[in-house]
Structures are given as C-alpha cells and as structure tokens.
Image: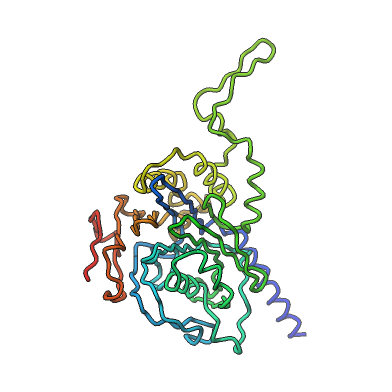
Amino acid sequence: MKTGINALMKLKLAVFAAWCVLTFNPLFACTGISLTSSDGGVVVARTVEWALGDATHDRLVLFPRGKEYTALTPQGNNGYQWKGRYGFLSVTGYEQDYGPDGMNEEGLYVGMYYFPGYADFAKFEASEVSRSVSVGDFMQWMLSSFKTVAEVRQNIDKLKVVNVEDPRFGGAPLPFHWKVADASGDCIVIEIVKGGEVKVYDAFLGVITNSPDYAWHLTNLRNYIGITTTPRQPLTLGGVQLAPFGGGSGLIGLPGDFSPPSRFVRAAALTASVRPLAKSEDAVFEAFRILDSFNIPVGVTAPANKLPKDITSATQITTVSDLKNRVVYFHTMNNRQVRKIDLSKIDFAKIKQQAVGQGDHRAQEVKELLVSQ
C-alpha cells in the first residue's frame, strides 16, 4: 500500500512539474532576429529575458583559441572532450561559462532560447559517455569548433545532448533550442525533441522565440498573411465613407503581447518590413530599433496581486552581433548606452579566459570595451 502511495505522489509531482513548465514559460522570454545589408553585412540580434534572484546577464566572457574542454554529464565532468579551434565571446549568467548568446572569431553565432514543454534530450547512457554533452557544452562546442553553419550541419550527429540537472534552476534539466548563423547569411534553428531526436530548420527570416516548436510557429504565420505595411483604403458603406484614423492601419491585428507565438509573428512582420540597409552599421542600428518593440518591463508578466520577487521575464540584455565585421554590440537593463567589443582586435591565441563588461550596477560607462592582450 505504501509503495502505491509513493508511486501516486511521484505521479502527482511529475504532473505538477509539467504544469509549471507549460504555465510559466513566459517567465523566460527571448526574441531573436537577423538583418542583412547591401555591403554583405549579416547582423544577428536578440533580447535576453531570464533572471532568478539577483542574477543578471551583464557578464561577458572571452574564451581563448585552443582551450581544452570536457563536457558535463549526470556523472560529472567526464563527457566528450575536445580542443577548441576558435576563440569566442559569450554572454553568461549565474557565473556559468555558457549561453545564452555567443559569437566566435570567425563570425559564427550561436544563441540559446528557452524551449519548455518541447525540448527532450537523449537519456544518458554510461556506455556513450565519451560523446555526451550538456546543453551548455553543446553551445560551446559549436562556437569553438566551427566557422560556418554548413560545418555545424555536417557534424551535429557526432554528439549526444543529454539531460543534466542544474541546482541553480531548481535541479531541473534546462530545456533550450538553438539559433546558429554565420557571416554568409546561412541560419538554422536546432531543436532536440522526443528523447533525442534532432530537428534542423532553416530559420525563417532569422526569427526565433520560444515554445511551441519551430514548425508550429511557421504554420501559425498563415493566420497573419493579411498583415501589411500598406494603409487600408477608405470603405464606403450605406453612403458613409469609413477611413483609417492614421498610419499603421495595415498592421491592425498584429499581436502585441509578450507570449512566444505573438513575439514570433511580430518579429517576422517587423523584419520583413525593414527598408533596404546600405551598411552593416545601418543593420545594427535597425536591429536595436526593432528589438525595442520586445523589451519587457519589470513586473509586466508577474502576478497582478504581488510584485515580482525576482526580475521575472524583464529584458536583461539586448545584443546585436555583426558577423561580417566580428563586432558585438549590447546594452543592458541598468545601462542603456550601447557598447561594443570588436573581436577582430583580440588575439585569441594569446588571451586567457576572462570576464569583461561585468557589473553595470558598478557604473561602467565606457562606449567601447578594450580587452588587454
């Protein structure tokens, strides 16, 4: 009888955990876009909304070329081992060494996006420990090993992404999917579902948000094919002319809430409406302007009857990566001044792993972060 009760309790806990994931996934809401310019520029941009307690995403870490890596598994640091071919910069949080955003010295970009209720990584098997990696290792492996999306496609089946519980997030496995882009404009979304099944999608206009899965988002776009930047024409009914009140009437019906499906549609519409951009810098500024439409204020998604204890779902940092010129631009919740790190000025063969740009609350006011060699 006691065994039956324990089994019932475990089932109830599992159902409750699943309900929490599906119900509260708006707490971790990120939006990604891509833009191109006439001079061959490719710009990838995103917002990051993720914070528990006092943690914020103002910590950027440089990783040297030639670094030795050992992947994390449920058994510890005993997974896949590799030596990085390329150095890279990564936005991080919670003092961990990965994600949610990064670009390497060759212009390969990788971004992690929360994917609850759908991400389902492979079950860990001790016999395959030598090819097993955690979600963070998977991101670092791509950034340190490849310079093109094509290379990622060719090698993605060599590793096995497994569930690794993280005590910083309540002991639960971390559900993510990834956007990968390179300086040629090639861009994909990688999703791992159903116990390890890897799905790769061509990223539609470079847009990505969160759950549901990417195929669902593409199907949902069909509900908005009437959206246009062209103002609606006056209509006469019963001898009365009905005209739009002002500009933007063609976009009536464009969703404005912060749910992942709505953000996906809005990001696709705003990206598709971008005017021709001459230079990479033009694309950088336009990306910041577009993402201003996705900034989530503190408390907007918190319960109405109480203030958020944590920085729930608020936009922590906005990054714009110029893949052609190898420059990362960013501003944060506590410092809206746009700053940049030029990776082309960094000798990744000589630097040591180091944090830069940490602590906006400590009054960092520089326009450009210069990394000492």
- 309 w.r.t. 247: above or below: below
Residue 183 seen in this snapshot? yes
Residue lying at the far top in this picture: please name it.
Answer: 239
Q: Quadrant of residue 241?
A: top right
Residue at the (67%, 70%) spot, across then down:
194
Q: Is residue 105 left or right of residue 308?
A: left
Name the colouring of the figure: rainbow
Q: Is residue 263 left or right of residue 348?
A: right
Residue lying at the far right in this picture: please name it.
Answer: 1
Residue at the (54%, 55%) spot, across then down:
209
Q: Quadrant of residue 326?
A: bottom left
- Of the pair 336 and 19, the residue shown nearer to us: 336
Residue at the (47%, 57%) spot, across then down:
312
- Of the pair 27 and 181, the residue shown nearer to us: 181
Q: Quadrant of the C terminus?
A: bottom left
Where is residue 338 shown, x and y percent of the image? 31, 51
Residue lying at the far bottom in this picture: please name it.
Answer: 127
Q: In this view, does 331 lie to the left or right of 46?
A: left
Where is residue 56 shown, x and y percent of the image? 38, 63
Where is residue 331 shown, x and y percent of the image? 34, 53
Where is residue 92 shown, x and y percent of the image? 39, 67
Residue at the (54%, 66%) spot, across then down:
176
Residue 55 seen in this snapshot? no
**For the image shown, how many numbered marks are present on the structure?**
0
Q: In which quarter of the image is the N terminus?
A: bottom right
- Of the pair 54 and 6, the residue shown nearer to us: 54
Q: Quadrant of residue 47?
A: bottom left
